[in-house]
Amino acid sequence: MDRFLIEGGVRLAGRVDISGAKNAALPAMAAALLTEQRVVLRNVPRVRDIGTLRSLMEELGVDSSVVHEEHGNRVEIEARRLLNPLAPYELVKQMRASVLVLGPLLARFGHARVSLPGGCAIGARPINLHIRGLERMGARITIDHGYINARADGLKGTSFYFDTISVTGTENLMMAATLAQGETVLENCAREPEVVDLANLLIEMGARITGAGTPTISIHGVGSLHGADHVVIPDRIEAGTFLVAAGITKSHLVLERVEPAHLTAVIAKLSEAGLSIRELSPTELEVHRDGALRPADVTTHEYPGFPTDMQAQYMALMTQAEGSSVITETIFENRFLHALELARMGADITVNGRRAVVRGRTPLSGANVQASDLRASASLVLAGLAAEGETIIDRVYHIDRGYERIEEKLTKVGARIKRISES
Ligand code: EPU
């Protein structure tokens, strides 16, 4: 297991190239199962979760290849046939997003056997809505031995209301509906840019979809889909993490290849906290901080609200604000594991249920800490950059799931961060 060693207290300066969005690339790869033709995806981030989904494709008997390009990878998938409809526990437990193959497999091949994802560090994360929605489309679903068995002799259009807004739930049902007979209307859908990117890819593949990015998505099923060549959107969470990196180290950075419109809530909150952020061009953001950080309360919400995937990083920032702030997490019930690790570095944080009070400003000092999930690890890296002395972060594999070479990107702008491999 790799670890990071960070020497904190260093100012950063320079340009950071933002990668493609992991959470857009994963459903896009799953969408390739909907056609026998080749789907080409560009700007795919070089992160571990993408490798996990490729391993799953291999299990299914689906060919995929990766070509290293100037910006990200080009992944090509050609699902001519399905050798095995099974998504095994060993892969699904590594990455819950594996459940995204359920809708496409069922819609195109009429059957799928997908492991239930099980527990998760950040919350219960059930997939009842994915299952209920597919049942509404005519699928027969049973659970045995920890697996979801789904069968359908042709899915049928339906109307379905999500009583909780779900990103991958919306994506799974939208994909399944593209090949269903008739019209499907999904209500109370997730409006995340990653959902819109998936809809755009599906439309390029011949799907008839309207309303992605609004709460109501309508899909007219078609007989078959064809290949496409698609560029994945920039990763708004990676971009947000680097904005915080500049804020917490009182530095000046320019982020390249970003989509500022996807960061409205994050930019607003970080500006309230005292960061200066401005658009240099439609794909470049400049960020710097000169003065003190101000405490600013935040509540996570579904898009277009402040993302839960930025909550941990924001908490690290608030430890350096001149006063107390309240962070409320509304999406996941257990997403404050980083608070205890931040406390080991000197932060003063009280967690009470879904609410955390961060009392700033407390000096941070380097310590040995453990990453518990992807975004929690990012918050520890950020705290390490601001801390006095040396921070060692264990279980860096969590961060490799979703950040492309974060230590290289940080080193390029002046951070002192090293990966130490066990080997
Ligand atoms: N939920 C249900 N039933 C369902 C589905 C979801 O009750 O059938 C609940 C969940 O338990 C949770 C809430 O709905 O409380 C929202 O969960 P959602 O389904 O939207 O999460 P997800 O689709 O599993 C995606 C991202 C996460 C991100 C969340 C929220 C991907 C691959 N993952 O997960 O990303 O935190 O949306 O925005 O898109 C990350 O990248 O670090 C990450 C965890």
Image (cartoon, rainbow, N blue to C red):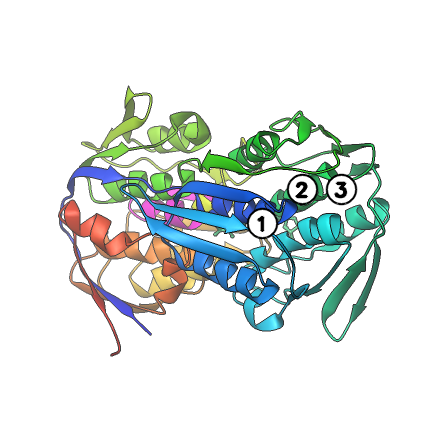
Q: Considering the numbered disc 1 on the image, is that residue within a helix, a strand or a loop? A: helix
Give residue 226's mark: none
> Mark 3 vs mark 1: which is more N-terminal?
1
Badge 3 amino acid = Asp
Please state which of residues 96 and 368 is positioned toward the viewer in this rendering.
96
Q: CA distance from mark 3 to mark 1?
A: 24 Å
- Spot occupied by residue 184 in the image (x, y as percentages of width and height): 79, 33
Could you classify mark 3 by the number of other residues whose Cα lies within 10 Å: few (under 14), some (14-19), or many (20 or more)? few
Horizontal arrangement in the rendering, residue 318 relative to residue 80 (left or right):
left
- Spot occupied by residue 148 in the image (x, y as percentages of width and height): 74, 64
Could you classify mark 1 by the number of other residues whose Cα lies within 10 Å: few (under 14), some (14-19), or many (20 or more)? many
Please state which of residues 240 and 216 is positioned toward the viewer in this rendering.
216
Q: Considering the numbered disc 3 on the image, is that residue within a helix, a strand or a loop? A: loop
Q: Residue at x 47, y 42 (%)?
A: 40
Q: Residue at x 65, y 59 (%)?
A: 82
Q: Which residue is mark 2?
A: 175
Badge 1 amino acid = Ala
Magenta-colored span: 311-327
Callouts 3 and 2 close, C-beta under 8 Å: no
> Mark 3 or mark 2, which is nearer to you?
2
Quadrant location of the N terminus in the rendered image: bottom left
> Mark 3 or mark 1, which is nearer to you?
1
> Mark 2 vs mark 1: which is more N-terminal?
1
Is the distance from the Cβ of mark 3 to the nearest ligand 1 atom less than 8 Å?
no
Horizontal arrangement in the rendering, residue 353 relative to residue 187 (left or right):
left
Q: Which residue is mark 1?
A: 30
Quadrant location of the C terminus in the rendered image: bottom left
Q: Which residue is mark 3?
A: 163
- Spot occupied by residue 112 in the image (x, y as percentages of width and height): 72, 60
Q: Residue at x 34, y 44 (%)?
A: 241
